[in-house]
């Protein structure tokens, strides 16, 4: 029987040290703590509230912290009809959010203007700000919003975040390792 | 005084100024001249008990002269009588405001100005109410296209024409089957 060596197992640090890629660690932290900016503009906002409430409980996905200051938010959930009168206000709030930031277009109106083929309604919020996830429905059920949120989490976990968001720091770190 | 006596006294006092009396389901409608509006409105408000202005609406009879029609819906809370006053004005005319008689008329008149471009003489604050200041069109006029027109107000708002994708999808007034009535792509026949 071969000897087992103490060096292979150190009970003092077991469970406290894990090995991973830097990006994977960043992304894991980010995707499980997405603070939404609730941009509730019409009836989709009611479903957004239902998603946050106990029956569907968006907290299961770490996104229960709705912030009404864009400076504390990671993802803007555009829930409802964006009129032209509101459009530049939505854009300004998006611009006040810190990077990295994401946008979910919730429902038909936010995605395409929906049934409002009209002089007063912006035909999709993607004409003003970049959208990561579109959710169909009029309004979408809370399950659909949660599915959209999970899609966004999937997207975040595949990002090359350090290289994309902190290029100089990453270069310096790579130089130090080499 | 009953509701009928109330309306009779109005008819007796103004006589010729009230035209085209129609009754429908207990609601009385009169057509008046724009010049008589303030006199009739003041009397209805102060001497008859029409204390509630339900609504003011406007109609664009595009192609006719006079072009616009304004409809005042009055109601007496004490006697439960409904009175509707209509008047016709052309595009370059102004209507007298009644916002000093019924304060609620202030916003109703602003909405008519915003959507139809009809101006109200003597209104204390005739600004747009739904669209923003500087928006160049009056969207409920008949010549304004359903999909809208492009406009630009830097830092305030912009508009673009919406894609109708084969529409507008409109219903047809008909008593035929639901299949005939349902909304289909029917471009306006101009």
Image (cartoon, rainbow, N blue to C red):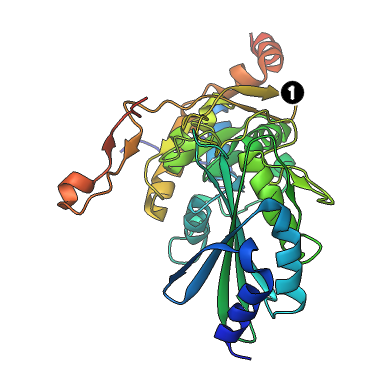
Q: Is residue B5 left or right of residue A98?
A: left
- Tell whether A4 sits left or right of B70: left
Residue found 53% across the figure and 51% down from its top:
A42
Q: Residue at x 77, y 43 (%)?
A: B127
The quadrant holding residue B68 is: top right
Going by the picture, which residue comes out furthest to the bottom? B1
Total marks placed: 1
Q: Nearer the viewer, residue B73 or B161?
A: B73
Q: Quarter of the image for the C terminus of chain A: give it.
A: top right
In this view, B82 is above or below A111: below
Q: Position of residue B79 (x, y in %)?
A: 61, 86
Quarter residue B19 falls in: bottom right
Closer to the camera, B89 or A52? Answer: B89
Front in this rendered view, residue A147 or B97: B97
Q: How many other residues sit within 10 Å of disc 1, few (<14), some (14-19) or many (≥20)?
A: few
Q: Position of residue B156 (x, y in %)?
A: 73, 31
Secondary structure beneath disc 1?
Answer: loop
Q: Is residue A21 visible?
A: no
Q: Which residue is mark 1?
A: B154
Q: Farthest front residue?
A: B16
Q: Which one is in front, A62 or B134?
A: B134
Q: Which quarter of the rendering shows the N terminus of chain A?
A: top left
Q: Work out whether residue B154 can be spotted.
A: yes
Residue B76, located in which quarter of the rendered image? bottom right
Q: Is A175 positioned to the left or the right of A144 in the image?
A: right
Asked if residue A162 is positioned above or below residue B5 in the image, the reply reads above
* Residue A120: percent from left, percent from top: 56, 36
Spot occupied by residue B10 in the image (x, y as percentages of width and height) = 65, 75
- Callout 1: residue from which chain? B
Give the residue displayed 76% in from the left and 68% down from the top: B42
């Amino acid at each position: 029987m071969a000897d087992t060596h103490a060096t292979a197992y150190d009970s003092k640090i077991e469970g406290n040290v894990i090995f991973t890629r830097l990006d994977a660690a960043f992304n894991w932290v980010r995707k499980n703590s997405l603070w939404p900016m609730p941009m509730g503009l019409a009836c989709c906002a009611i479903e957004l509230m239902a998603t946050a409430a106990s029956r569907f409980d968006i907290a299961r996905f770490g996104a229960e912290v709705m912030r009404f200051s864009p400076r504390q938010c990671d993802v803007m959930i555009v829930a409802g009809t964006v009129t032209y009168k509101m459009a530049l206000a939505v854009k300004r709030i998006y611009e006040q959010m810190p990077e990295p930031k994401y946008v979910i277009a919730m429902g038909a109106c936010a995605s395409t203007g929906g049934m409002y083929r009209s002089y007063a309604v912006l035909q999709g919020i993607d004409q003003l700000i970049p959208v990561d996830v579109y959710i169909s429905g009029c309004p979408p059920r809370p399950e659909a919003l949660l599915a959209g949120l999970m899609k966004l989490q999937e997207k975040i976990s595949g990002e090359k975040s350090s290289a994309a968001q902190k290029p100089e720091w990453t270069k310096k770190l790579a130089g130090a390792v080499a | 005084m009953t509701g009928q006596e109330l309306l009779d006294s109005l008819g007796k006092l103004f006589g010729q100024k009230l035209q085209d009396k129609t009754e429908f389901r207990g609601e009385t409608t009169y057509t008046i001249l724009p010049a008589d509006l303030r006199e009739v409105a003041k009397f209805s408000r102060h001497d008859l008990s029409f204390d509630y202005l339900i609504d003011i609406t406007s109609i664009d009879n595009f192609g006719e002269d006079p072009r616009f029609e304004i409809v005042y819906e009055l109601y007496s809370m004490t006697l439960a009588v409904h009175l509707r006053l209509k008047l016709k004005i052309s595009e370059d005319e102004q209507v007298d405001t009644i916002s000093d008689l019924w304060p609620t008329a202030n916003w109703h008149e602003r909405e008519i100005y915003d959507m139809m471009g009809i101006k109200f003489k003597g209104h204390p604050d005739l600004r747009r109410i739904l669209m923003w200041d500087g928006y160049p069109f009056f969207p409920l006029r008949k010549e304004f296209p359903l999909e809208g027109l492009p406009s630009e107000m830097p830092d305030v708002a912009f508009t673009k024409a919406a894609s109708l994708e084969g529409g507008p999808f409109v219903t047809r007034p008909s008593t035929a089957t639901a299949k005939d009535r349902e909304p289909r792509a029917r471009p306006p026949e101009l």
